[in-house]
């Protein structure tokens, strides 16, 4: 999942599975953008996972393009 260009991953499963994958990606320094139909299930995930403001977790309900601010060597 980690490479120089933005990567889109689709996970079919429950919210717990998505949060597990997101949590592990955050542990490696990645920025996580969640596109979901039910954003309330992700409320508070960023601060809970990071222990601070959720500056590396973004939850969206639309399919707008995600700006690529980082690289594989230095994630944002």
Image (spheres, rainbow, N blue to C red):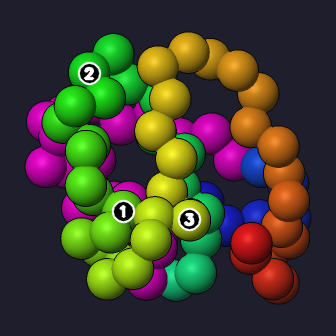
Residue 76 in magenta stretch: no
- Find numbered disc 1 in the image and state the secondary structure of the residue it sits on: helix
Q: Position of residue 35 (x, y in %)?
A: 47, 29
- Judge by depth and name the residue closer to the eye, 18 or 49: 49
Which numbered disc covers residue 56? 3
Which mark sits nearer the N-terminus, 2 or 1?
A: 2
Q: Is residue 1 left or right of residue 17?
A: right
Residue 14 in magenta stretch: yes
Would residue 35 be visible to someone looking at this image? yes
Which mark sits nearer the N-terminus, 3 or 1?
A: 1
Report the predominant secondary structure element of the magenta stretch. Answer: helix
Label 3, label 1: how many angstroms apart (C-alpha)? Answer: 7 Å
Residues at discs 3 and 1 in contact (Cβ within 8 Å): yes
Q: Is residue 34 above or below residue 37?
A: below
Crowding at dot 2, Cα within 10 Å, few <14 / some 14-19 / many 20+, comes out as few
Residues at discs 2 and 3 in contact (Cβ within 8 Å): no
Q: Which residue corresponds to the image point at 39% horizontal and 79% vertical from the top-left?
A: 52
Q: Position of residue 33 (x, y in %)?
A: 54, 45
Q: Position of residue 34 (x, y in %)?
A: 46, 39
Which residue bears the numbered disc 2?
38
Q: Is residue 53 left or right of residue 49?
A: right
Q: In the image as oriented, which residue stretches furthest toward the front?
A: 53
Q: Which residue corresponds to the image point at 36% horizontal and 62% vertical from the top-left?
A: 46
Which residue bears the numbered disc 1?
46
Q: Is residue 15 left or right of residue 19?
A: left
């Amino acid at each position: 999942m980690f490479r120089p260009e933005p990567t889109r991953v689709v996970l079919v499963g429950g919210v717990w599975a998505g949060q597990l994958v997101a949590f592990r990606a955050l542990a490696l320094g990645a920025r996580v953008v969640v596109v979901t139909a039910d954003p309330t299930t992700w409320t508070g995930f960023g601060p809970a996972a990071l222990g601070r403001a959720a500056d590396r977790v973004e939850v969206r309900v639309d399919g707008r393009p995600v700006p690529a601010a980082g690289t594989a060597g230095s994630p944002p």
